[in-house]
Amino acid sequence: MQSNLRNVVARTRTAERELFFQQKVYDETPENERLRLENEDLRREIVALKNSQFIMIDDLAMVISCYKEKEVEQLMEERQQHSNEEEFQVVARRFEVCFEECVWKLTELDGQIILSEMQIRDFLYTRTARINNSGDHLLEIGTVKVINRLPDAKYLETLARLPQPTESTKKQPSIRVICRDLAPVGGISVKEHFEVNVVPMNAQITYKFFDKMMSFFFPGKNVHEPSKDTPAIESGSQDDASSQASSSISLAKRFRGAVNGSFRKTSEQLPTKVVGLSMLSDIDKMRERAEKNIMFVYIKIPEVPFIVSYKGNKEKNIEDVDRFQMVFPLCEYHYRNWTWLDLALAVKQRCRRVLLHQFMKQKFLRNKIGSELTNVEPIDEEQKKRIVLGTAIMPEKKKSKKN
């Protein structure tokens, strides 16, 4: 349509130019009938070209306006689909790390004694950082195998993937971690969404190996109890997030209000001479606490079947299990101000509780099935008498009958 309009405009200009030169000749010889007829034909042609030009301009303007309206509608639909503000933040940079195979050895502080060995294949890590310090993280590990290198280890292969029945599940990564970060609030890191997906695995763990790994990843921490600076870990399996999610106050506003409120209370309660020192000490404490703690808005670890073998720190332990088929429980937490250690301990407590429950349930079912099988066999009258009276009395009764 635009090319046709350009052709009409070019023909109109050519006709107007011819009319201009012809009009000069006609003015010199007005009695020439042929020039008069040509002049009238050119004028009629110019009028017809201009009329068609106006019609094509209107059609083209209508098409352009419809195209713009459609673009605006598509943009509005995209904004409605991605109503989250973080989707519109400009991406500052992207990072990607990938390799096919590696062996990672965990050692003591001196680097001499090897604690464990991790064999990793098909590793992929991507990070997207935005201009407001928010971002996304994605970690995928195709296959992973953890080997216990401690001396006198009962189990050599600590963690390994179970054989998968179908090809589609074989291509699924063994471990996938998805994390979405919001902009920090008051120096506190905010994890909007944290999810860990694991395929069915075989875990063979000892108490010594677990203690060494926790001390390696959390040095100088009490790896058996939550830290005192953070809130205590609740023992409930599911969190009631409906009341917290229904609040109209955003997470960022709550943090800002808490931070500002703490400063106001400090300045109102303390004398003016010590306000400066107390403010500095409070800021240092808050900065130190903010570096340790993370605000988890939503945490999800889906359930997955495991085959678990565990050996305690003693020769015989009640909690020892061997190739126990366990279903790793669904772990969901909402709005938790935790450290990574607190999260690990919360998952550990949840797994321990579910493992004990499933173990006792299976044990009672076995005992019940065994008792039902024994009750099926019939018992005759003589066996009942032997059970009640004893074997010593039965021969005497027989002798008395003979006599």
Image (cartoon, rainbow, N blue to C red):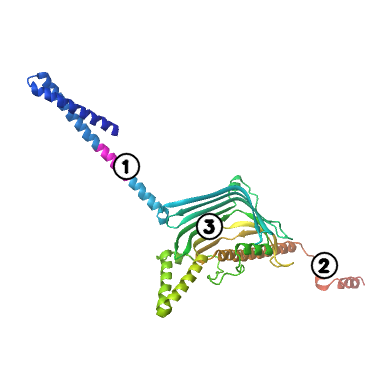
Q: Callout 2: helix, strand or loop?
A: helix
Q: Is residue 16 visible?
A: yes
Q: Give the mark nearest the N terminus, 3 or 1.
A: 1
The residue tagged 3 is 195
Magenta residue span: 58-70
Label 1: state its secondary structure.
Answer: helix
Q: Quadrant of the N terminus?
A: top left
Question: 32 left or right of 166?
Answer: left
In reply to whether residue 69 is colored magenta, the answer given is yes
**Residue 382: mark:** 2
Residues under labels 2 and 3: Cα distance? 66 Å
Q: Nearer the viewer, mark 2 or mark 3?
A: 3
Q: Residue 108 sits in which quadrant?
A: bottom right
* Mark 1 residue type: Tyr
Report if residue 361 is visible in the image.
no
Residue 30, x across and y down, in percent: 7, 22
Of the two numbered discs 1 and 2 in the rendering, the one whose residue sits closer to the viewer: 1
First in sequence, mark 1 or 2: give its number: 1
Q: Residue at x 49, y 66 (%)?
A: 290
Question: Closer to the camera, 355 or 78?
Answer: 78
Q: CA distance from mark 1 to mark 2?
A: 100 Å
Residue 334 in the image: x percent, y percent? 50, 64
| 56, 257: nearer the viewer | 257
